[in-house]
Image (spheres, rainbow, N blue to C red):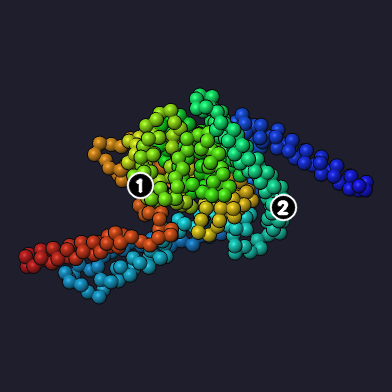
Amino acid sequence: MSPFNNLLCMLLGISFTVWFTLLLVFIIVPAIFGLSFGIRGLYMKTLLKELKEIRRNGSSRDLDGSASSTTTGPSPSTSEFEMSDTFYFCRRGIESIVDDEVTKRFTAEELESWNLLTRSNYNFQHISTRLTVLWGLGVVIRYGFLLPLRLTLAITGVSLLVVFTTMIGFLPNGRVKHFLSEKVHLMCYRICVRALTAIITYHHSENKPKNGGICVANHTSPIDVIILASDGCYAMVGQIHGGLMGLIQKSMVKACPHIWFERSEVKDRHLVAKRLSDHVKDKSKLPILIFPEGTCINNTSVMMFKKGSFEIASTVYPVAIKYDPRFGDAFWNSSKFGMVNYLLRMMSSWAIVCSVWYLPPMSRQEGEDAVQFANRVKAAIARQGGLVDLLWDGGLKRGKVKDTFKEEQQKLYSKILVGTMCLQSSLNMSS
């Protein structure tokens, strides 16, 4: 080999050695012991200072708003249908299109000011030379330094999870296996959290879910699992996949009693309920983590909770998760982005900043059915996380409006007609 090639190989070797040494000392080892040097906190404060400066310099954009208006029903002047009665429903329909409180929950949340990410400002116009330079510098930092670093950490975390859980799976069931499984899961999830530069604030840790319980949380992103599991171990529930995801699932279930279902079993509600119920009855097993919305919402609201998990247990542990979109939008629009594309967007964001609140356990009250219990838990999560509490089904992301919702509007018009008929009868009697 020529001297130049020797020098190049030596420099590459030194670079990789330094790179992995820094990763090991400042990220992987602290993740194993649950420690932090405060680097992410300092990084977030620096970003926040710059974003405030951008907003102060007039880069904030006005959000389109719709003026609220009070709608009134059809005129009660007659008890029979009139053509003017349709104006009320036409107006309600137009208002729903202009300010649709449902479908806008399935798209990214709008920001008050630009966060130097092109994806959050597709209509970017030149504001100042300083901001343009900052944006260009940000592209270099995010894609030239942060993305390779985060990819390395993600690969490291997933690889360690697969290898160690597979090895632990050969141990006999007992305290040693349970202890090692818990430590390995926490270590690997904490490494994956650092792969997203996730800065998480946990509140009220004394309310963390206990073994044999069911933890329910609002759902914004697949990384919700990593966010919660980096602070405590859970038994996951989900459908069996193929490929890399399937390999991870198979290795995890060897070390911990996760609950995976075949595709054909998912539709069998009785089978699913029985397996979950059997798990909950065993107080030695980890709490089950469930997202009752069944789909990802853009972190501005909480939509209808499916009643299934509230039929299984009389006590649940609610958790509220709220992301800060200024540093990076954690919402996964699955109809627009695939998993790989989504994760690359997460790893090329500035950071993932969120708050997690552990709420006190809630029990079903006397005479309360599963639907009422689910709505009460949902309202508590929405109130704590500062989210809008909606009764709509998140399944509307891909499905059509159910006939029951259409019937509600028909019932509304019927009540209006009945009311006008009663009013007309009273007027006739008084005259």
- The answer to whether residue 131 is seen in the rendering is yes
Q: Position of residue 341 (x, y in %)?
A: 59, 55
Vertical side of 113 occupied by 11: above or below:
above
Q: In percent of the image, x 81 and y 41: which residue is there?
A: 13
366 on left or right of 132: left
The amino acid type, in three-letter code, at marker 1 is: Arg
Disc nearer the start of the sequence (2/1):
2
**Residue extending furthest top?**
175
Residue 44 falls in image quadrant = top right
Q: Residues within 10 Å of mark 1 (few under 14, many from 20)?
A: few
Residue bearing the label numbered 2:
140
Residue bearing the label numbered 1:
269
Q: Foreground: 59 or 410?
A: 410
Q: Position of residue 30 (x, y in %)?
A: 64, 32
**Residue extending furthest right?**
3
Vertical side of 238 occupied by 74: above or below:
below
- The answer to whether residue 53 is seen in the rendering is no
Indicate which label's residue lies in the foreground, 2 or 1: 1
Vertical side of 161 occupied by 416: above or below:
below
The amino acid type, in three-letter code, at marker 2 is: Val
Q: In percent of the image, x 86 and y 46: which residue is there?
A: 8
Which type of secondary structure does the marked residue at label 2 adopt? helix
